[in-house]
Amino acid sequence: MSPKKNQHRDGDRRRSRRREAYGTFIAIEAPSVSEDFCWSGTLMDINGNGLALTLPPELGPGVKVRLTMGLDQDTHLDRVPAVVVRYEEGVGAVRFEEWPEEERLKLLSFLLED
């Protein structure tokens, strides 16, 4: 893939407003990997399409997860469906899958705050 095409793909991934959120704790469920175990990660940044976070090696690309996090005092997201799209050296990215509009609006409100 030429650098120009790769730059375009990166731009597509980051089209919505991204907000840094270093240090926010995330509970990660991955029923396809373990029904009874929950991992933890640390949020790095988030946008309307997904987020970057620390991930354990068991949760590589293609694994479906459910994420629970408190973004601030007023914004708590519970069991948001997502899929891991990238993983490298303990850092990954997930893309949100379809979830209730009411919950998605909580995230979008958080992203628009200053």
Image (spheres, helix red, strand yellow):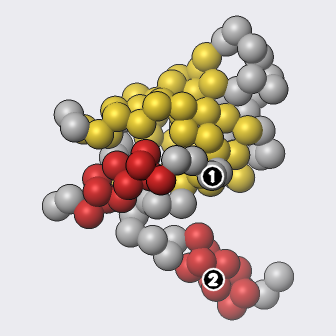
Residue tagged 2: 7
Residue positioned 34% across, 34% down in the render: 76
Q: Residue 98 carries which label?
A: 1
SS type, badge 1: loop
Which residue is farthest bottom?
A: 4
Image height check: is 96 above or below 66?
Answer: below
Which residue is farthest top?
A: 36
Residue positioned 81% across, 26% down in the render: 32
Q: Would you call the spot at circle 1 few (<14 residues within 10 Å), some (14-19), or many (20 or more)?
A: few
Image height check: is 103 above or below 111?
Answer: above
Residue 90: image location, x then y, percent:
62, 37
Q: Which amino acid does label 1 sit on?
A: Glu
Q: What residue type is labelled 2?
A: Gln
Residue positioned 70% across, 27% down in the render: 30
Q: Residue 26 carries which label?
A: none
Residue 94: image location, x then y, percent:
62, 49
The C terminus, quarter of image? bottom left
Residue positioned 67% across, 12% down in the render: 37
SS type, badge 2: helix
Residue 31: image location, x then y, percent:
74, 23
Residue 112: image location, x then y, percent:
26, 63
Quadrant in the picture for residue 69? top left
Q: Would you call the spot at circle 2 few (<14 residues within 10 Å), some (14-19), or many (20 or more)?
A: few
Quadrant in the picture for residue 3? bottom right
Marks 2 and 1, the one that precedes in the sequence: 2
Query: Which of the two residues, 93 or 105, is positioned nearer the viewer here?
Result: 105
Quadrant in the picture for residue 2? bottom right
Q: How far apart in space, not on screen, are marks 2 and 1 (Cα)?
A: 26 Å
Contact (Cβ within 8 Å) of mark 2 with mark 1:
no
The N terminus, quarter of image? bottom right
Left or right placement of residue 113 versus residue 65 in this view: left
